[in-house]
Image (spheres, coloured by chain):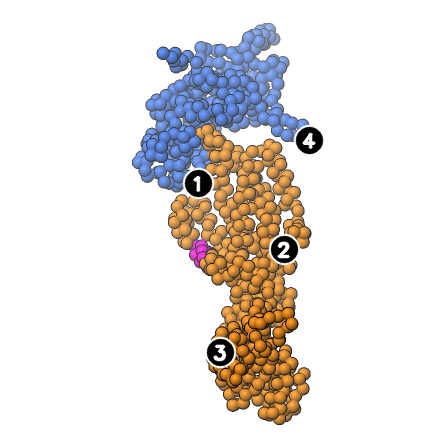
Amino acid sequence: MRPGEALRVVLRSGSGRLGIGLLAVLVFVSLLVPFFYPLDFGLRFWNNPIAWADNPKAAPPAWTNLVGDQAPRHRVFDAESPSQTVETGPATTRLYSFTFDHDSETPPTFLSVSVGEVSFYDRPPVISMSLARPDGLTATILQEVVRGQRPDETPPVSRFADEPRRIFLSGDTNALTAATDFLLQEFGLRLSEAEIQGNLEAALFGTPTSSDAPEFEPLTGEYTATIRVITYDSRDAVESVRFVAAGGVFGLMGTDTQGRNLATGLMFGFPVALIIGISTSVAATILGTFFGILSGFSGGRTDTIIQRVSDVMTNIPLLPILIFLIFVLGQKLWLVMTILVIFGWPGLTIILRSMVLQVRSGQLVEATQALGASRWRIMFRHVFFQMAPFIVAQMIFFTPAAILAEAGLSFLGLGDPSLPTWGQILEQGFRTGAIFIGYWWWILPPGILIVITAMTFVLLALAMEPVLNPRLRETAA
Amino acid sequence: MTVQPEIGAAPMLDLQDVAMHFKSRGRGFRTTTVRALDGVSLTLDRGETIAIVGESGCGKTTMGRVSLRLLEPTAGRVLFDNIDITEVKESRLKGFRRRAQGIFQDPFTSLDPYMTIRQIVEEPLVIHGEGSASERLERVEWALEEVRMRPASDFLDRFPHLLSGGQRQRVGIARALTLTPEYILADEPVSMIDASSRAEILALLRELQERHRIGYLYITHDIATARHFAPTATVMYLGRIVEQGPTADLISNPLHPYTQGLLNAVPEPDPANRLAERPVLPGEAPSPANVPSGCRFHPRCPVFMAGLCDVVEPPLVQVELDRTVECHLYGEEGQARAEQDATESVSENA
């Protein structure tokens, strides 16, 4: 049967169309990933908290704004060159202005200012920030001096080259003091630093409603954040400035409690899941088929040895062995896959052997022997094809089993940290208590993806039946 | 000039005192030996047909398998064209495999359901590395035409399950025919085919025999088809040949009590006989794992002679030029016993 014909037969059934469609999506997403992701994505980004520092923590997906309360959008402003430069004597003031429309009833979840790759000669630069509000008031809320030259350093002195200096305003004492001053001056509201700490964003993005308590009415409209960097030498440089007004919602799939963009992690899980499932099942099926047919067809000592080995292998509990070996040899994905293959083939071998025993004494084998066919030809040209539908079904059914086994191990916290998988995302969600807090966007998508991937292969197995079994095909047609 | 061996000088297929014993594990540590064949001799020539008749379990299929060297006999020799193939390695049997083929009982299971008709018929050529792809196709078409599957092109790409039982069996015959063999084992080739197609298949086999001078070993449990198809018949019982002779004579005048019983069991299409009670062989054939002593038929024999049949193995008696029977009734000792009995009964009467 030609491949085109086979595809047509598969597409004739509903389960075939759905299975092929889902598989196409899985494969398409998997193929996209290598183009957009570095190979060390897991270590360099996914499991590196700094990479996600500017994301809101545990934010639901952005599309949840379509229903219910309007959470503020996540805004990130990057600038490499100042929007305005003012020279006063030897000092140069670089102004970076970011204007945005805040239309939500809730303030941003946090505000952060980052300055990267600063170099200076004479005096260290001074960083400050002010926020112009829609009611015409301007709050100066940050004043920081870059750490000065140490005795062992020679100009130009470089700062924040590897990682930008990131200041979270609600965690910065200077910012809190400045905000307290602002509230006292403009509204006559006196608050302690402890009172303002959890309410900094609300204070900056609202108007006080009482004279002695941290209660604010939201103020919507156009805000302008201006970051000033004052340098004292013409050769001084500032390479990047970033201002983040963190939203209450984020991206397509939201974030976890570390601020990681779940969409990127889930997407990276596609090729990993497919590789685990397909390569493990193909390898285990090839081994199982070879030994099963050989065992059943040869009989005698070969048969006994293969069967005893299979018996031993199938009776070793897989999960404890996996956990043990992972503890001994480390959390490696290839290790999990190898163990799944080594412990995966004997089951198929035992079943195939019993099927081969039936076929071996049949007339087909006798007739082919009489033609002068060699043992190998009979085994792998005739006997194999009698078993083929079963073997392919087994292979397709083993695919989700491998994916689920990996997910299970990851869920136990034994996943490979260099490769994020859906199981690991689930595990982190579970460990953080996402289920109890109600972070559904963290638990449901990886779970559903695992189920859909497993279902894809089951649907394919169903649709492959008529292709591999000509008798079924003709009655269906 | 090389000396060609004269065709017919030696029989094409020659089974000499062949025995086939299967060992199987019994209860505990005991092993039981199943004596499927126990000293069988038979010769078959090119263009000749011999029918082997017997109940199931009598060893006729085992004999066919030994004749094709699908089984290595425990004792005795199998000669094909004067070459001993009894203990030759499978890898050195290629020549024999080309010249000897088999047609099997069940056309539903003897054809690979995952191969097209073309692949099935082509397979012997592929195995023996014959010709190019186009030559092989030509040969496949020829073989299909030979078995009257015309036009061959209609069948090439079909799968066996699309064909009727009779058509499948013809595909089986075409497969055996592609290498133009000299010997074909036909192991119950029509027993699983509709009655309407049986005569057709047998006629086809005979036609092919005339055209290609094929020797058939025709294994059957059906004496009626043997009469039409095979001039010579052999009756087997429990691993031994009990009677051999021209089929017509064997049927009109069966000598061995077992042959007589077998023929009596064939229903006659005469309504007048519908109430007639026909003599039936008592009991069932014993298991070949537990062969009776002396004549192996004696527990069921209607003319059993105590003290002789259950003690002494019956001799092979040449009754006529082309008829042999293995029974004490025709042996010297048995004849003497019969005479003695006759005189005794006469004296008793007197």
Name the secondary structure under disc 2.
loop
Q: Mark 3 points at which residue?
A: A82
Amino acid found under the numbered disc labelled 3: Pro
Amino acid found under the numbered disc labelled 1: Tyr
User: Alpha carbon of mark 3 to alpha carbon of mark 4: how far?
Assistant: 96 Å
Disc 3 versus disc 4: nearer the observer: 3
Q: Can residue A120 be seen in this view?
A: yes
Q: Which of marks 4 and 1 is nearer the N terminus?
A: 4
**Magenta-drawn stretch, dominant element (helix, strand or loop):** helix
> Does residue A424 appear left or right of residue B192 in this picture?
right
Numbered mark located on residue B114 in the image:
1
> Does residue B130 appear left or right of residue B289 in this picture?
left
User: Alpha carbon of mark 4 to alpha carbon of mark 1: how far?
Assistant: 42 Å
Name the secondary structure under disc 3.
loop
User: Alpha carbon of mark 4 to alpha carbon of mark 2: how far?
Assistant: 50 Å
Task: Pinpoint the chain carrying mark 4.
Answer: B
Disc 2 versus disc 3: nearer the observer: 3
Q: Colour of chain A?
A: orange
For residue B315, which quarter of the picture?
A: top right
On whether disc 4 and disc 1 are found on a single subunit, the reply is yes
Rendered location of residue A79, percent (x, y): 49, 75
* Part of the protein shown in magenta: A13-25
Image height check: is B344 above or below B112?
Answer: above
Residue at point 53%, 75% (across, down): A236
Amino acid found under the numbered disc labelled 4: Gly
Residue at point 48%, 53% (across, down): A460
Q: Answer whether residue A18 is magenta in the image.
A: yes
Image height check: is B234 above or below A471?
Answer: above
Q: Name the residue under label 4.
A: B28
Name the secondary structure under disc 1.
loop
Q: Which of B195 and A469 is in front in this view?
A: A469
User: Alpha carbon of mark 2 to alpha carbon of mark 3: how far?
Assistant: 47 Å
